[in-house]
Amino acid sequence: MFNLYNPLNREMFQIIDNNGKVINEKWMPKIENQRLLKIYKKMLFSRVADLQTVNYQRQGRIFTYPPNYGQEAISGAVGAHIRDEDWLVPAFRELGAMLAKGASLKEIFLYYMGYEEGSNFKEANNLLPVSVPIASQLLHAAGLGYAAKYRGEERVVYAFVGDGGTSEGDFHEALNFAAVWGVPVIFIIQNNQYGISTPVAMQTISDSLAIKAVAYGVKGIQVDGNDFFALYRAIEESAEACKRGEGPILIEAVTYRRGAHTTSDDPTKYRTAEEEEFWAERDPLKRLMLYLQERGEWSPEEEEKILPQYREEVDRQFIEAENFGEYPKEDIFKYLYADIPDDLVAQQREYDRFLQWKETKIKK
Amino acid sequence: MKIMNMVNAINNALDIKLAEDKNVIVYGEDVGVEGGVFRVTEGLQLKYGKERVFDSPLAESGIVGTAVGMAVAGLRPVVEMQFCGFIYPAFNQIVSHATRMRNRSRGKYGTPMVIRLPYGGGINALEHHSESMEAIFGHIPGLKVVAPSTPHDAKGMLISAIESDDTILYMEPKRIYRAIKQEVSQEKFTIPLGKANLLSQGSDVTLIAYGAMVREAQKAVVMAKEAGISVELIDLRSIYPIDKETIIKSVKKTGRVVTVSEGPRSFGLPSEIGQIVLEEAFLHLEAPPARVAGFDVIVPLPKGEHHFMQNPYKIFYQIERTVKY
């Protein structure tokens, strides 16, 4: 596959068309229908959660949030492959993959409500917290890959970045380090066409983002990021290659951020309704849904029936997060060091004295 | 005169300099088409074109490093770092080149450039969007660091910064971007960098603040007044160079000094001011120099941020302790 779809050939890897019709039978992955439906439902759930989170933000119940709308297939395909021993190194638009790794929606909500506790994933192994400074996390992925190789562990590291992130030095350093070391990392670029307002054409004049793999001497592939089967297959092949010691791999998933960059952003400033419409036709869930429907595995009626259940479940976890309670003031000091310096303990006591003083002032 | 908030005032300053000096180039992440995530550069690309106001690739080191090259070639780049927490990839270019080129080339090559940096907390933001790390930058030889507190000052100081032959880190207190409105002249005017502003006279204690903390300090001055304490308030405006003259003159009069900073307390700006006062007004002091600053912790996410942020109560607490010392 990596030979056939070498980025120098400038061909995007696709398996289904916009109507869910298989157009590339040769590479169609073998997934049992039951399992496929399960995966679809997970993607659907993540979409419901994502859209609802934007609503919570509009209601003033959380702070800034970066929507995933339109990019769910990428997280969905990674989520279908990632194992407990594998690492997930997210940027900040990988809701489905984080849920697949075992993060709870409640934890995700806590994070966006402004609790650091939301990055303490109780049930998830080998999942790093979201990384806000663009592309910086990719170097961690290379390091995680080195540790796995050094210890002879069969792990795969899944690391995410956006199209904008490919301009940062850290992106290039990470690819080069991982390549020189030959470590099992799959770098996944979610090319959603924009870094906030800046179109990908202003980030690079390369023919693709995948083509950058060539310069680093690693396998790379450009995949239709709204085509679940193509993503599934590309990730499957990449993970196998990593296990054979042929990593790292660079995957460019071509997709579209149907929502805003974050809830603070207004996309109407920099893109057109026609463009949004163009991509709506390529929506990843719609395409997979049509595939399933064609085979009698799923229907719009069944979907209508299940959506309220999902919304209720999202709400339940959201309200649980809302009832998380007080933010213990000790917590701002507690996790900074393994061995806390005396002066920091003294600063904490000083804060207590101030709060006592404030009490008396307010009473007066 | 026109009513402006700080966003309008900075935009107006950029507009004036772009109009009068062809060497001025404005760029950064999302500053062109979108006009910046805070809309500070809104409309400027339309007016001056894509060669003078533009979106760069997403790379802070790239932005500052290329600005060094432009500046050496005689342009006057004004670049934006989108948020304070994202400046660190550019740190190498600031510390290793922007601040050294003049010295390294014994004056042959200067780097007249402005790095605009929205900074500070209190806006319920995600991680890396709320820091106030001016002390780090004040510590770099070759860099000038300023932070206005009003629309008027923001305009006059930015024009001075763009006209300066040095590299200026121009810190914008984003929390008050739109919170303060005042009448600002639409004409060109400058405010010299390195000069503090005496905001109100007092006799018991000198209170020093800058950026968004000036407004908090003003509220503390009112609280102190109700408690019978007369506070002299100085808006520092320039972090480096520090206006020692204004500080010392005031402290010699009041005998006490409290400095407010949003940054972590250790090695912060209040520490520097405390030392200056000890060196130059020691015999006039009635109390040790005091500081109101953050704890030495990472700025907490929104739910915990109020424990970290400075506020009028925290300032008044130190004023009272200092006066009662």
Image: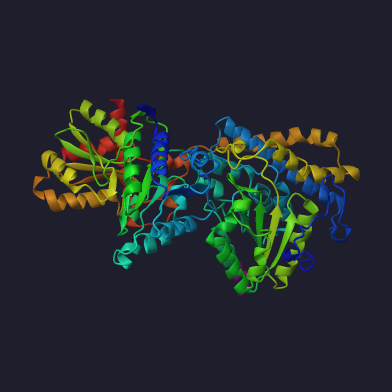
Q: B153 left or right of B258?
A: right
Q: Which residues are magenta?
A: A144-150
- Locate residue A204: give its quadrant: bottom right
Residue with the most extreme left position: B283
In the rendered image, the vertical position of residue A116 relative to residue B215, given as above or below: below
In the rendered structure, does residue B161 fall within the stretch colored magenta? no
Residue with the most extreme right position: A295
Asked whether the viewer can see residue B180, the reply is: yes
- Locate residue A354: give its quadrant: top left
Asked whether the viewer can see residue A339, the reply is: no
Residue under the image location 45 percent in, 38 percent down: B123
In the rendered structure, does residue A146 fall within the stretch colored magenta? yes
Q: B209 left or right of A75?
A: left
- The one nearer the camera, B106 or A19, is B106
Q: Position of residue B191 (x, y in %)?
A: 28, 41
Q: Position of residue A62 (x, y in %)?
A: 55, 36
Quarter of the image containing the C terminus of chain B? top left
- The one nearer the camera, A330 or B219, is B219
Q: Main secondary structure of the magenta part?
A: helix
Q: Position of residue A163 (x, y in %)?
A: 62, 53
Residue under the image location 15 percent in, 51 percent down: B278
- The one nearer the camera, B127 or A220, is A220
How many callouts does the rendering have?
Answer: 0
Q: Position of residue A18 (x, y in %)?
A: 82, 46
Looking at the picture, the colour scheme in use is rainbow
Quarter of the image containing the N terminus of chain B? top left
Q: A218 left or right of B72?
A: right
